[in-house]
Image (spheres, rainbow, N blue to C red):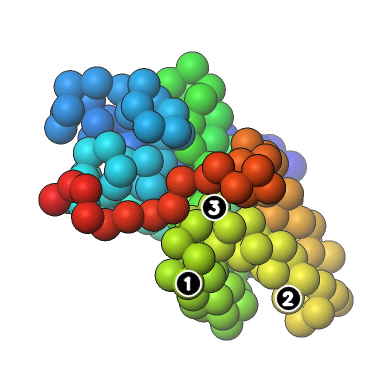
Amino acid sequence: MIKNLIILVIAYLLGSINTSIIVSKIMIGDDIRNHGSGNAGATNTLRTVGKKGALLVVIGDILKTVIAILIARLLHEDNAYATYIAGIGAALGHNFPLYFRFKGGKGIIVSTVSILFASPFIGLAVALIAIGIMAISRYVSLGSILGAALFFILSVVFHHQDTNFVVFSGILALLAIYMHKSNIIRLINKTENKLSFGKKN
């Protein structure tokens, strides 16, 4: 129990390193949360800072999640369980960062990396379908929301015998959908912004 708590805390602290906020302060001299949608994530960074900034955010989010999971696996004898705890901790840290007044991003990249570690097949399937939805609709939020729901459905179908995995998938899916509550309202009202690559270099 103590070991699990230590892993959760370490992952949370690593997840709290919000790359989007750091990159925006370096590249435009201001907090990303003061611009665009106000979300401290890769999509808002792309719209506000540009492609280079967004790429740095993606790399940063991937790295902090990988590091959290690798540390967890070093500390815990059960790699799968360690991944579940670290994945949830990193997502919570990213969404509610200790270092940035608990206002962060939506944790999609962090969650995707965790899913790929936990189940490469499901992770790849969900990622490809979500990207396809984003490409067709140009709504990043729609792809993220449907991807989260699909992840849970596939987890129940293919891992129904593994309670820990289903709980892990349920927490990440609910967290992702909850963080998109304002996007859901805008999608319903048809006021959600579509992704565009033409504004910033």
Given residues 78 and 178, the one toward you in this image is: 178
Label 1 element class: helix
Residue beneath disc 2: 154
Q: Quadrant of residue 22?
A: top left
Would residue 54 appear left or right of 195 to someone viewing this image? left
* Residue at 43% over, 70% down: 135
Few, some or many residues within 10 Å of mark 3 (<14, 14–19, 20+): many
Type of amino acid under label 2: Leu
Q: Nearest to the eye among marks 1 and 2: give it.
A: 1
Label 3 element class: helix
How far apart marks 2 and 3 lie (CA) works out to: 20 Å
How far apart marks 1 and 3 lie (CA) works out to: 12 Å
Residue beneath disc 1: 136
Q: Quadrant of residue 78?
A: bottom right
Residue beneath disc 3: 141
Q: Quadrant of residue 33?
A: top left
Type of amino acid under label 3: Ser
Q: Earlier in the sequence, mark 1 or mark 2?
A: 1
Q: Position of residue 85 (x, y in %)?
A: 63, 50
Would residue 200 appear left or right of 184 to someone viewing this image? left
Residue 67 appears in the picture as rendered? no
Few, some or many residues within 10 Å of mark 1 (<14, 14–19, 20+): few
Q: Position of residue 73 (x, y in %)?
A: 52, 59
Q: Earlier in the sequence, mark 2 or mark 3?
A: 3
Type of amino acid under label 1: Ile
Q: Nearest to the eye among marks 2 and 3: give it.
A: 3
